[in-house]
Image: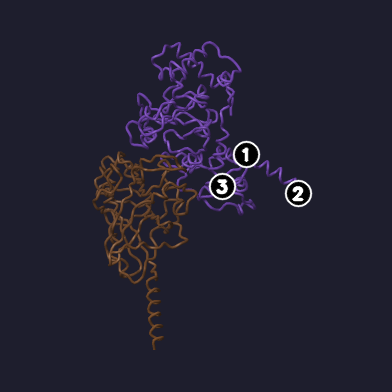
Amino acid sequence: MNDMRCLGALMFLLCLLISCDRQRDVEVRVVARDARGNAVACGQELLLDPDVSMSLKKLRFYVHGVAFRDTRGQWISPHQPKGLSHVGDGVWLIDLDDGLCDLEFSPQTHLSMPMSLPAGREYDAMRFTLGVPESLNHLDPLKSSPHLAHTSMHWGWQAGYRFLRLDGTLKGNTPYATHLGSTRCTGEVGETVTCARSNRPEFVIKQPWFESGDVAHITLDVVALFEGVDWSAPQGCMGNAEDGDCAVILKNLALDPDTGSLDGTTSRIFLAGDATK
Amino acid sequence: MKLKVYPFILYICMMGCGPEGTPLATQAHLGERLFFDPVLSLHQDRACASCHNPADSFGGPPQAPGEVSIPSLLDVSRQRRLGRANPMIAQLEDQTRIALFGEEPAEMGMSGATHQLMRRLRAAPYYCVQLLGGVFIHGNCVDGEHDARGASVRVIHALSAYQRTLTFPRTTLVDRWQRGERTLDDEASAGAALFYADAGCARCHGGDLYATSYTTEAEAEGGAPPDYVRVFPPRAVARPLRLGLGVQAMTSDERDYQRFKTPTLRGIAWRGYYFHDGMRVSLHDAIAFHAPHLQAYEHAQLARFIEGLSEPRVQP
């Protein structure tokens, strides 16, 4: 009788262990919306303001430091699948122009963040950091893993990656570009490079995650990214706070333009769920 | 058998090997072909040599008013820092990658087009075989490098190997004078005295390249090494704006506004443009701009000495 009890207890423990270790494959899909609420895609007219539209060429960004909070308040880092060209090293490359505007990208392959999380738990918040971690930021893109090998995301003269880029043309075919990445860098490429301004914004999206399925959405609000930009004299942003529209855009990302650190406010450029029409 | 193989291995070791295991001579030969081939530009409308003109010291004047001039590639492998105003770039491969894939400014414009570049190279029998290690049969490139990144790296290594061959001959009048092989005429001798002493030219144009600064970090101020010298009075360049800022574009430090890397004086007399914006069209004019406190005859003496760094004119 005692043997049976012991066996039962062992079976229970084994089941518990298996249950704890069981992973659930999930996916966070990223969409972007303009002022009309329309989903953003390459070559489309993107409404930034009632009077300002942009023909989108590129909208891409890197995400790292992803974690989900379970109902006990514990932050869990997901596992990444292997073998995908836009995923690796804890970094996801998101390509919201759908890859159609760039020969280096394949269409419809960079719109989501596949991952796996411990099963049997409920999650109420997701956090992530925009950009590439410092440890990966100064690599040679042509000798890096596929997700970091996109030359259009490498910022050669700043010796690092563009964390986010949005390129397009405004009325009159005027180019407009916003590139965010670490700036005020010194050192020597291939040796040691350090950047005084990190410019890595962090976000927390509170919503019940994966309640009704294995796919959940977040929305990049492009209008919120550019809120406050003077569209009567658009200048674009090349990372430094002193450049054109950078100060406004960095503040919208909850970054202190003078230090490149978090400014303690909450950025509203990422929304929970699919907020497009 | 061993006796036949060892001399070959020894020959390869003496030649040195490129990063892909190809002898450097072959890398440089490939690089030369690529340097003159517009296949490397997005619209196939320009080669490296279109701007870095071999007849103009592998440099060139501004392409349009308000733009920056094209820096010479002569002796580029001997320079401590590369480019015009980015103190972080010290390796030729990094600078070449920026020229191919950079966007601000877009020189060859290949950002995001590594797959297109590889397809073009695989379609060319010579590059298929010699650069990518494939076999060209019936109009197709079989085997060899299939990875777009790998193909791009091979291009960069070959171009860098070629650029390392672009050295300025150390046979100029001044070189031979410094080696004690000849004397200078009176005007050039007076110019040398001014250059190394009264006029203070050698303070920035020092060393074998005539581009090494002896200014201290403290004297240089700002965020750049002393080899980067401020243009005074500043002359704004409209396009591209970032290059016109000089090192300030990197450091955001006002003291670095229009600080540019001091160029070599070797071969400088051959050019018809001077400074980052090409605004001076003669060597005399450039010297007079730098040394307004000297007399005209002293400008002429300095010019005679500096011309001695370009004579006789020998193509690398």
Respond whether the residues carrying marks 1 and 2 are from the same subunit: yes
Respond whether the residues carrying marks 1 and 3 are from the same subunit: yes
- With respect to residue A178, does B177 lie above or below? above
Measured as percent of width and height from the top left, residue B85 is found at 41, 34
Mark positioned earlier in the residue sequence (1 or 3): 1
**Numbered disc in front, either 2 or 3:** 2
- With respect to residue A142, does B228 lie above or below? above
Query: How far is mark 1 from mark 3, CA to CA?
Result: 20 Å
Count neighbours of disc 3 (C-alpha within 10 A) and say few if under 14, some if 14 to 19, many if 20 or more.
Answer: many
Q: Which residue is mark 1?
A: B25
Q: Chain of mark 1?
A: B
- With respect to residue A186, does A22 lie above or below? below
Kind of residue indicated by mark 1: Ala
- Regarding mark 2 in the picture, which secondary structure is present there? loop
Mark positioned earlier in the residue sequence (1 or 2): 2
Measured as percent of width and height from the top left, residue A253 is found at 28, 49
Which residue sits furthest bottom?
A1
In the displayed structure, does residue B98 sit left or right of residue A55? right
**Numbered disc in front, either 1 or 2:** 2
Measured as percent of width and height from the top left, residue A109 is found at 42, 59
Chain letter for purple, please.
B
Q: In this structure image, what is the colour of chain A?
A: brown
Q: Which residue is mark 2?
A: B1
Q: Which residue is mark 3?
A: B121
Query: How far is mark 1 from mark 2, CA to CA?
Result: 26 Å
The N terminus of chain A lies in which quarter of the figure? Answer: bottom left
Q: Chain of mark 3?
A: B
Kind of residue indicated by mark 3: Leu
Do the CB atoms of the residues marked 1 and 2 lie less than 8 Å apart? no
The C terminus of chain A lies in which quarter of the figure? Answer: bottom left
Q: State the mark number for residue B158.
A: none
